[in-house]
Amino acid sequence: MLRSLRVFAAALFAVAVSACGAGGDSTAAEPKIANGAQAADGEAPLVRTSASSAAAEKAEPQPPLMQVGPWFPATFNIEEPFIDLIHGGGIPWDTGNMGTKDLMAAGVIDPETMLPTHLPDGAWLRGGIYFPGNSSEMRLHWDGEWVLEWEGDADFMIEFLSREMQWPETKNSIVFTRDFKRGRTPDHSRLQLRRLNGPLKSLHLYRAENEEAFKAGKIYNPKFIEAVSKYDIVRTMDLQSANAAVIRSVDDLTPMSAPYWAATDWGNATGEPWAKFSNPMQGMPIEAAFRLGVEADNQVWFQAPMTLGAPEPFFDFRPDDDRRDIWAHRFGEAAGNVAPQVIESKAWDDYGDAFVAALIASGYPEDRPLYVSIANEVWNWAGHYFLTTKYAERMGEGLNDYLGFEVGSRGAYGALIARLKLAIDAALARAGREQDIIYVIEGQAAYVQLTGAALKGAKAYMEKKGEVWADHAPEFGVSVASYWGYNEGVESSGVDPSNLAALEDHFLNGSERHLGTRANVLKLFRGAQREGAQYGVKLIGAYEGGPHFTRPWTRTPDGKRDYHMTEEEYREFIWGERGGRVNYEINKALAEAFPGIILSNYALAGTPGGQPWFEGTLEAENPYARSWEALMELDAEAMRD
């Protein structure tokens, strides 16, 4: 969207908020900090664009930095981040009777390229499931003309697609059309490899409209870039599969030439039985993350691995019953038993060199700030977070004697970030490159002590290595999520969620005791700021944010869900005028209370009708999506009003 149109949309949104917002003055629940960016009780000043920014210490209001977190690389994510859809998948080959694991064991799949070398006797190969969808929006999204091209002597077809909808373009490409709108194509399709004479050397799948960008060497979908480039910062956590990629050394890193950028061992361990095999490469190439910042012209917030130096491969710890908790415990325990050796492993230094080499190769500007953290939400025991949280817990136990105190999982998390910092600092020096990097301690907003525990671990490790903490503290930052609308807060307040006006009023004017209200979000951010100030570290803002309110339900005696809002009421609230006002007012209150803060939008599109933080589509023009554009246009003058 042109900047003039963004300004116009923001102005219309601001008028709507002023005319009919239930929240009144966005700072009513939060007095402004007495001394501008410097907290009244002497807390650390904030930063705007980098750890060394002097502008953040001015008393004048400052507009926020806007950060966006795209969703997972997946063949069903309609954010469609990559031009080449193959990049969004794991390793998908099968014959119907043989899965990828069996094909790898039989030598059919090359472990270096993850592409077929030959066809099994009497069988075709099928690759991936593309264009699926659990809603009409998703299925319609994939309509259009597509190109499949490859290197090698091979014949492909698109499975489940009639011959009249696909045709050879060259001997190494086919063009096909999806037309779900008119019922001419199925819900999803697969690639079918029918003939192969010698190894397949490359494979690409992209929209015909993106061919020029693809041939020019671009990685990211132009429409995705258009959406992301509106923001100052892009956090690549999900694109990197940060909590599922098990990277022990640089040997596990995915090269830029690899077709599949979403293969992960933890993902396989928690997946279907046929998927339980070790991947020879993990997640997205480092360079590809930095290239997003180059193509979108914004700063990158990068998530490094925390399992560097782990003594043995993850799949060596597979239990007979495949229980993921036992699996993760064994892997973490092996590292914890030799924790000092793990944290001092050369794997960290090798990763530092690979990180800097990728930074340089990507063309990421030397004078552009860069944010770096490790893993994601290393306190969360749910789902794909379990592995890294368990790993940190066991590492913490193993570092107690080494660091001289009861380290715990969060202390280990902080120590590992400090280790990463020293590795990257040294690698930058070897490369003769300067880079303004902010090392981010990401914390749980509701338990601010976890932020302090991580900083204690980082400080202890630096001092263990003979470093002066005060020399490094300015290059760290603390961050918590700015999610609003937690269901627990709604339940504890007694608000009827089907009363949309009351729900809006609760989120904007409810007590700070209720999780997810404006007052509560501001309270939690003040707590995170205090924790950072104890160690001379600034609060930089939110690592994720947006609504966290899901459609509320209770379990019936027969085990079914009894929803307290219809789906229509839920969508009307989240994507409608009320959800847009709540999102705008809470984020604006944060921007006013903490000048120069980073505000985060997680995520853009994902799967429509899925999680509450999805806007709908990249082109969504609903009031919730427009609220983010209005926040982009906040300036110092508007924040004085």
Image (spheres, helix red, strand yellow):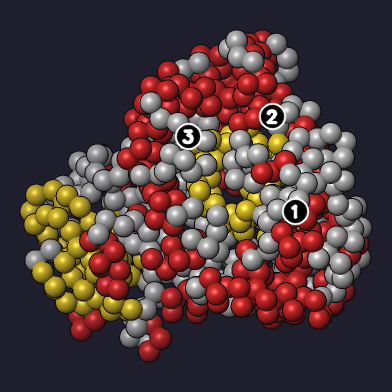
Of helix, strand and loop, which one carries label 2?
A: helix
- Mark 2 = which residue? 454
Residue 309: x and y, percent?
A: 46, 23
Please report whichever mark, 2 or 1, sits nearer to the chain's N-terminal start. Answer: 1
Residue drawn at x 58%, y 29% as measured from the top left: 417
Of the pair 489 and 390, the residue shown nearer to us: 489
Mark in front: 3 vs 2: 3
Where, quadrant-wise, is the C terminus in this rendering?
Answer: bottom right
Q: Residue at x 66, y 44 (%)?
A: 55
**Nearer to us in this view, 268 or 469:** 469
Query: SS for tag 3?
Result: loop
How far is mark 3 from mark 1, CA to CA? Answer: 27 Å
Q: CA distance from mark 2 to mark 1?
A: 30 Å
- Give the amino acid at mark 3: Gln
Q: Which residue is mark 3?
A: 435
Residue at label 1? 61
Is residue 386 visible to us here? Answer: no
Q: Nearer the viewer, residue 620 or 124?
A: 620
Badge 1: few (under 14), some or many (20 or more) residues near its Cα, within 10 Å?
many
